[in-house]
Image: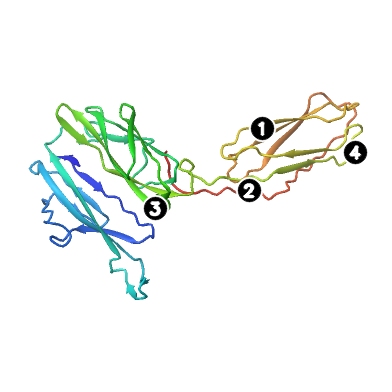
Amino acid sequence: MRVPANCQRDFNLLLFDPDGDMVRCRYAVPTDECYTSSDLPNDFTLRENCTLSFWGNSNTTGTYAVQLTMEDFPTQSISLSYTDGSQSNRTSNDTLCKLPVQFVVRVDPPVTSCMEGLYLPMFLSPTPAQGALLNASADQPLEITVRAQATNSTVAELLVSGPSGITKNTTDPGEYLLRWTPTEVEEGGYYPVCFIAQGVNNSSKYHSELRCVIVRVGNTSAIRTTEPITSPPLTINLTTTEEPTTSPPLTINLTTTEEPITSLPLTINLTTTEEPTTSPPLTINLTTTEEPITSPPLTINLTTTEEPITSPPLTINLTTTEEPITSTENLQPLLL
């Protein structure tokens, strides 16, 4: 990963534990966890939340190996059972497991401006946010769109680190499509995907921030970010309090044909099956007053196309045969 010597930069390493354990980072211990110490200049600092910060110093140009250890800790005291029948107790200060994290930071010569979007590429929508949790299904392709721009350099490459089989295609200048199809073997797992946009100006190269997302492979569709809503049939009975002179009572059954995720106004024309002697056909317009997320009430306008001749005023009672439906939402955001 690159950073100009005069620019401050935070390298936010991906933190995630499916059990909800606390994750921390530290420098690796030489000979035990790595070959030699990182020996980074004082311009680098590492926080426990796994953010490596470079504070910017024009005298720090060079290439530096960063060797870290990422560990997880229980949030409370727990008891572990092993296959040989033994047990052990762990507190919030005891490490459960650890992973090596190793990469290289190259500090390049100073740049005219450190503002993102000029020389250093910046990510644009619909690029997913840092740490976003994306859902995927086995044997179904997951697509991630990444966009980046820079005005004083050309976004010429997207550097990607991800699971085996992930592919990258350029769809437009500065826009990339990542595609990955998990297998059944990967069902139930969590997989990181990290990327950096690289800008070029003559022989100089400039990197965007490091951004990582998490892909959860399960039974959920990789495209859908909310659970599908199943709407039971809605029955509305319209009856008059007095017997009309010529028009028989009407019963209207309304059944939704699509999931009520984005509602459109409905127009329903109701006519009697028999030709009324004196009453003209009724036109009823049904529209929802809000998005159908929490089942808002329906507004129903009843109008006759002509002035009724002998029909008395009608009183109409609207009752639903089912309780109002409240949709539930699943997570995060995808982008996909």
Image point (75%, 46%), residue name = 319
Label 2 residue SS: loop
Label 1 residue SS: strand
Q: CA distance from mark 2 to mark 4?
A: 33 Å
Q: Earlier in the sequence, mark 2 or mark 3?
A: 3
Q: Residues within 10 Å of mark 4 (few under 14, many from 20)?
A: few
Of tags 4 and 1, the one toward the viewer is: 1
Is there any visible trace of residue 5 in the rendered image?
no
Kind of residue sitting beneath label 3: Gly
Image point (48%, 44%), residue name = 221
Q: Earlier in the sequence, mark 3 or mark 4?
A: 3
Labels 3 & 1 near each other (Cβ < 8 A) = no
Labels 3 & 4 near each other (Cβ < 8 A) = no
On screen, residue 181 versus residue 158, left or right, reads right
Q: Position of residue 113 (x, y in %)?
A: 18, 33
Q: Which mark is residue 325?
A: 2
Q: Earlier in the sequence, mark 2 or mark 4?
A: 4
Report the front residue among 113 and 266.
266
Q: Is residue 97 above or below residue 249?
A: below
Q: From the image, tell me which residue sits under label 3.
A: 189
Q: From the image, tell me which residue sits under label 4.
A: 243
Q: Which mark is residue 266?
A: 1
Labels 2 & 4 near each other (Cβ < 8 A) = no
Kind of residue sitting beneath label 1: Leu
Of tags 3 and 1, the one toward the viewer is: 3
Q: CA distance from mark 1 to mark 2?
A: 18 Å
Q: Position of residue 82 (x, y in %)?
A: 36, 71
Labels 4 & 1 near each other (Cβ < 8 A) = no
Q: Is residue 222 above or below residue 287?
A: below
Report the front residue among 12 and 72.
72
Q: Position of residue 332 (x, y in %)?
A: 44, 47
